[in-house]
Amino acid sequence: HLAADLSERPGDAQVLRTIAVIELLYSAGLRISELCSADLNSIDQERRTVSVVGKGNKQRTVPLGIPAMQAVQAWITQGRTQWVRGNQTALFLGPRGQRAGQRQIREDLNAILARATSTGASGAHVFRHTAATHMVDGGADILLVETVFDTLNAKAALYAIDTLCAKLGRRIPVMVSGTLADASGRTLSGQTV
Protein backbone atom coordinates (compact mmCIF):
# COMPACT_ATOMS: atom_id res chain seq x y z
CA HIS A 1 0.00 0.00 0.00
CA LEU A 2 2.79 2.44 0.80
CA ALA A 3 4.50 1.75 -2.51
CA ALA A 4 1.24 2.63 -4.27
CA ASP A 5 0.92 5.79 -2.15
CA LEU A 6 4.47 6.77 -3.07
CA SER A 7 3.93 6.16 -6.78
CA GLU A 8 0.70 8.19 -6.67
CA ARG A 9 2.26 10.96 -4.54
CA PRO A 10 6.01 10.95 -5.19
CA GLY A 11 7.86 13.14 -2.74
CA ASP A 12 4.89 13.33 -0.35
CA ALA A 13 6.33 14.12 3.08
CA GLN A 14 3.70 12.08 4.97
CA VAL A 15 4.35 8.96 2.87
CA LEU A 16 8.14 9.35 3.05
CA ARG A 17 8.00 9.77 6.83
CA THR A 18 5.75 6.73 7.27
CA ILE A 19 8.05 4.54 5.17
CA ALA A 20 11.12 5.71 7.12
CA VAL A 21 9.33 5.14 10.44
CA ILE A 22 8.31 1.59 9.50
CA GLU A 23 11.78 0.74 8.21
CA LEU A 24 13.44 2.02 11.41
CA LEU A 25 10.98 0.27 13.70
CA TYR A 26 11.50 -2.99 11.85
CA SER A 27 15.21 -2.81 10.98
CA ALA A 28 16.38 -1.58 14.38
CA GLY A 29 13.60 -3.01 16.53
CA LEU A 30 13.00 0.45 17.98
CA ARG A 31 10.27 1.48 20.38
CA ILE A 32 8.07 4.44 19.43
CA SER A 33 9.56 6.49 22.27
CA GLU A 34 13.08 5.84 20.95
CA LEU A 35 12.06 6.72 17.42
CA CYS A 36 10.32 9.96 18.40
CA SER A 37 13.24 11.13 20.55
CA ALA A 38 15.83 10.53 17.80
CA ASP A 39 17.59 13.54 16.32
CA LEU A 40 19.28 14.00 12.95
CA ASN A 41 22.65 13.31 14.53
CA SER A 42 21.32 9.98 15.86
CA ILE A 43 21.84 8.54 12.38
CA ASP A 44 25.38 7.56 11.39
CA GLN A 45 25.18 7.09 7.64
CA GLU A 46 28.74 5.88 7.25
CA ARG A 47 28.38 3.12 9.86
CA ARG A 48 24.67 2.57 9.04
CA THR A 49 23.59 2.84 12.67
CA VAL A 50 21.08 4.72 14.79
CA SER A 51 21.77 5.72 18.39
CA VAL A 52 18.75 6.05 20.63
CA VAL A 53 17.98 6.54 24.31
CA GLY A 54 15.77 3.72 25.55
CA LYS A 55 14.24 2.58 28.78
CA GLY A 56 16.20 3.37 31.90
CA ASN A 57 17.75 6.30 30.01
CA LYS A 58 20.26 3.88 28.46
CA GLN A 59 21.78 4.74 25.10
CA ARG A 60 22.11 1.99 22.56
CA THR A 61 23.44 1.96 19.03
CA VAL A 62 21.74 -0.36 16.57
CA PRO A 63 22.75 -1.34 13.03
CA LEU A 64 20.39 -0.48 10.18
CA GLY A 65 19.73 -2.42 7.00
CA ILE A 66 20.18 -0.82 3.60
CA PRO A 67 16.41 -0.39 2.99
CA ALA A 68 16.09 1.44 6.31
CA MET A 69 19.01 3.74 5.50
CA GLN A 70 17.55 4.47 2.06
CA ALA A 71 14.13 5.25 3.53
CA VAL A 72 15.63 7.54 6.19
CA GLN A 73 17.71 9.31 3.54
CA ALA A 74 14.64 9.82 1.34
CA TRP A 75 12.74 11.24 4.32
CA ILE A 76 15.59 13.58 5.31
CA THR A 77 16.34 14.88 1.81
CA GLN A 78 12.86 14.93 0.26
CA GLY A 79 10.20 14.85 2.98
CA ARG A 80 11.62 16.47 6.09
CA THR A 81 12.69 19.53 4.12
CA GLN A 82 9.02 20.25 3.36
CA TRP A 83 8.08 20.43 7.05
CA VAL A 84 11.16 21.70 8.90
CA ARG A 85 10.87 25.12 10.54
CA GLY A 86 13.96 26.86 11.82
CA ASN A 87 16.69 24.91 13.57
CA GLN A 88 14.67 21.79 14.46
CA THR A 89 17.02 18.88 15.20
CA ALA A 90 14.40 16.12 15.52
CA LEU A 91 14.73 13.32 12.99
CA PHE A 92 10.97 12.93 12.60
CA LEU A 93 8.74 15.97 12.32
CA GLY A 94 5.04 16.63 12.07
CA PRO A 95 3.48 18.82 9.36
CA ARG A 96 3.86 21.93 11.56
CA GLY A 97 7.62 21.47 11.77
CA GLN A 98 7.78 20.27 15.38
CA ARG A 99 9.09 16.92 16.66
CA ALA A 100 6.60 14.18 15.75
CA GLY A 101 4.76 12.88 18.80
CA GLN A 102 4.20 9.27 19.74
CA ARG A 103 0.43 9.56 19.33
CA GLN A 104 0.78 10.97 15.83
CA ILE A 105 3.14 8.17 14.76
CA ARG A 106 0.93 5.49 16.37
CA GLU A 107 -2.14 6.78 14.50
CA ASP A 108 -0.26 6.67 11.19
CA LEU A 109 0.97 3.13 11.85
CA ASN A 110 -2.45 1.86 12.94
CA ALA A 111 -3.98 3.26 9.76
CA ILE A 112 -1.33 1.52 7.63
CA LEU A 113 -1.72 -1.78 9.50
CA ALA A 114 -5.52 -1.62 9.15
CA ARG A 115 -5.11 -1.26 5.37
CA ALA A 116 -2.40 -3.91 5.09
CA THR A 117 -3.76 -6.80 7.14
CA SER A 118 -7.00 -8.42 8.12
CA THR A 119 -5.51 -10.03 11.24
CA GLY A 120 -6.41 -7.10 13.45
CA ALA A 121 -2.73 -6.45 14.18
CA SER A 122 -2.15 -2.93 15.40
CA GLY A 123 0.47 -0.89 17.13
CA ALA A 124 4.11 -0.19 16.58
CA HIS A 125 5.12 -3.21 18.64
CA VAL A 126 4.09 -5.40 15.69
CA PHE A 127 7.29 -4.28 13.98
CA ARG A 128 9.49 -5.23 16.98
CA HIS A 129 7.88 -8.66 17.13
CA THR A 130 8.29 -9.11 13.39
CA ALA A 131 11.95 -8.10 13.59
CA ALA A 132 12.56 -10.64 16.37
CA THR A 133 10.72 -13.37 14.45
CA HIS A 134 12.75 -12.68 11.32
CA MET A 135 16.02 -12.73 13.32
CA VAL A 136 15.15 -16.19 14.62
CA ASP A 137 13.95 -17.32 11.18
CA GLY A 138 17.23 -16.01 9.75
CA GLY A 139 19.30 -18.15 12.08
CA ALA A 140 19.87 -16.10 15.25
CA ASP A 141 21.27 -18.60 17.72
CA ILE A 142 20.69 -16.63 20.94
CA LEU A 143 18.41 -13.86 22.15
CA LEU A 144 19.33 -11.36 24.87
CA VAL A 145 16.80 -9.87 27.23
CA GLU A 146 18.26 -6.88 29.02
CA THR A 147 16.54 -4.86 31.67
CA VAL A 148 17.32 -2.20 34.22
CA PHE A 149 15.19 -2.94 37.31
CA ASP A 150 12.15 -3.61 35.17
CA THR A 151 11.11 -7.17 35.90
CA LEU A 152 7.71 -6.75 34.24
CA ASN A 153 9.31 -5.94 30.90
CA ALA A 154 11.75 -8.82 31.33
CA LYS A 155 8.85 -11.18 32.04
CA ALA A 156 6.95 -9.86 29.02
CA ALA A 157 10.00 -10.31 26.79
CA LEU A 158 10.60 -13.84 28.06
CA TYR A 159 6.93 -14.68 27.51
CA ALA A 160 7.10 -13.29 23.96
CA ILE A 161 10.22 -15.36 23.24
CA ASP A 162 8.54 -18.49 24.64
CA THR A 163 5.45 -17.84 22.51
CA LEU A 164 7.61 -17.32 19.42
CA CYS A 165 9.58 -20.52 20.05
CA ALA A 166 6.34 -22.49 20.51
CA LYS A 167 4.99 -21.05 17.27
CA LEU A 168 8.20 -21.95 15.41
CA GLY A 169 8.40 -25.37 17.03
CA ARG A 170 11.98 -24.96 18.24
CA ARG A 171 13.90 -23.57 21.16
CA ILE A 172 16.83 -21.19 21.17
CA PRO A 173 19.04 -20.11 24.07
CA VAL A 174 18.02 -16.96 25.89
CA MET A 175 20.35 -14.77 27.93
CA VAL A 176 18.93 -12.42 30.57
CA SER A 177 20.92 -9.46 31.83
CA GLY A 178 19.51 -7.48 34.73
CA THR A 179 20.77 -4.44 36.56
CA LEU A 180 19.47 -3.05 39.84
CA ALA A 181 20.14 0.53 40.93
CA ASP A 182 19.31 2.55 44.01
CA ALA A 183 17.32 5.80 43.98
CA SER A 184 20.43 7.83 43.17
CA GLY A 185 21.12 5.71 40.08
CA ARG A 186 24.12 3.91 41.57
CA THR A 187 24.38 0.36 40.24
CA LEU A 188 23.87 -2.19 43.02
CA SER A 189 24.31 -5.31 40.93
CA GLY A 190 24.53 -6.43 37.37
CA GLN A 191 24.00 -10.09 36.60
CA THR A 192 23.82 -12.08 33.42
CA VAL A 193 22.31 -15.57 33.48
Image (cartoon, rainbow, N blue to C red):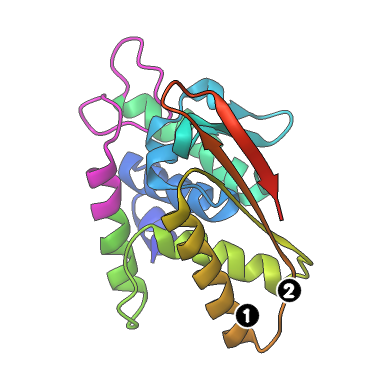
Q: In which quadrant is the N terminus drawn?
A: bottom left
Q: Earlier in the sequence, mark 2 or mark 1?
A: 1
Identify which residue, 183 or 158, lies in the foreground.
Answer: 183
Q: Which residues are magenta?
A: 84-107
Name which residue type carries label 1: Cys
Q: Secondary structure at mark 2?
A: loop
Name which residue type carries label 2: Ile
Residue 49 location, x and y as percent? 66, 35
Q: Reply yes or no: does residue 89 show up in magenta.
A: yes
Residue 4 location, x and y as percent? 40, 63
Residue 46, label in figure? none
Residue 97 appears in view: yes
Check disc 1 and report the residue beneath it: 165
Residue at 58 percent across and 47 percent down: it is: 68
Q: Are marks 2 and 1 in contact (CB under 8 Å)?
A: yes
Residue 62 appears in view: no
110 lies above or below 187: below
Check disc 2 and report the residue beneath it: 172
41 lies above or below 48: above
Residue at 45 percent across and 30 percent down: it is: 38
In-image side of 83 versus 34 (left or right)? left
Q: Reply yes or no: does residue 6 show up in magenta.
A: no
Residue at 54 percent across and 23 percent down: it is: 186
Q: Residue furthest bottom?
A: 169
Q: Secondary structure at mark 1?
A: helix
Q: Residue furthest top?
A: 87
